[in-house]
Image: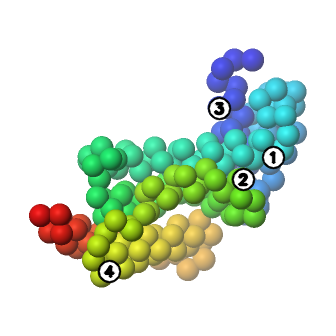
């Protein structure tokens, strides 16, 4: 099999997760059909359905991580908590997190092994424990949690902001800027 078959299979399984209103229907047969490979080709890379779903969860978490890295203006290791949270807000605001991402995230919540890739990515981006000021931490957590809500609203179409969407995003970004100013003052 070509080296790109694994990626094609993961892409196909990801697309399947976004079908039918977000219910996750990742099967070997459906994934093979969507990827344009045989069922045996899927089984070659993913011997069990759990292996396939874990592969998809890791693949999606990695894509989210890469999207957030693209939004940072500094290397990750040098980014402040506010810059990391702002990158998350930017990814959500750009519509980068979709119904399929949400379906895969939700599927992983029921199984600790499946949640591990999400935990690895999101814990490093959304951590604010190093921020000493409680008010600043609260602003950053508020921006993060509100961005989660925006992701869910956009992905499901339930109570998604329409006319005031940009104003909501501006408020979230403002929370991170205010927090970053205070965070940098603490470091001085």
Assess disc 3: are there few (<14), some (14-19) or many (≥20) residues with their C-alpha within 10 Å of its C-alpha. some
The picture quadrant where one finds residue 32 is top right
- Front-lying residue, 104 or 78: 78
Q: Residue under circle 1?
A: 50
Q: CA distance from mark 1 to mark 3?
A: 17 Å
Q: Which circle's residue, 3 or 2, is located before the other in the chain?
A: 3
Q: Residue at x 41, y 74 (%)?
A: 141
Q: Marks 2 and 1: in contact by CB < 8 Å?
A: yes
Of marks 1 and 4, the one in the foreground? 4
Figure coloring: rainbow
Q: CA distance from mark 3 to mark 2?
A: 21 Å
| Image location of residue 163, percent across then percent down | 41, 77
Q: Which circle's residue, 1 or 2, is located before the other in the chain?
A: 1
Q: Which circle's residue, 4 or 2, is located before the other in the chain?
A: 2
| Side (left or right) of 174 relative to 47 | left
- Front-lying residue, 57 or 10: 57
Q: Which mark is residue 113?
A: 2
Of marks 3 and 2, the one in the foreground? 2
């Amino acid at each position: 099999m070509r080296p790109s078959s694994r990626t094609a299979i993961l892409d196909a399984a990801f697309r399947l997760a976004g079908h039918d209103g977000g219910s996750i229907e990742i099967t070997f047969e459906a994934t093979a059909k969507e990827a344009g490979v045989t069922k045996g080709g899927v089984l070659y890379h993913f011997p069990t359905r759990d292996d396939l779903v874990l592969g998809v969860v890791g693949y999606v978490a990695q894509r989210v991580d890469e999207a957030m890295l693209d939004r940072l203006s500094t290397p990750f290791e040098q980014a402040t908590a506010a810059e990391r949270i702002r990158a998350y807000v930017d990814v959500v605001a750009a519509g980068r997190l979709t119904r399929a991402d949400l379906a895969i995230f939700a599927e992983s919540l029921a199984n600790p092994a499946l949640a591990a890739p999400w935990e690895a990515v999101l814990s490093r981006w959304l951590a604010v424990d190093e921020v000493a000021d409680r008010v600043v931490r609260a602003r950053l957590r508020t921006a993060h949690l509100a961005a989660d809500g925006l992701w869910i609203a956009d992905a499901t179409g339930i109570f998604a902001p329409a006319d005031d969407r940009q104003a909501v995003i501006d408020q979230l970004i403002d929370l991170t800027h205010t927090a970053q100013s205070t965070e940098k003052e603490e470091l001085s």
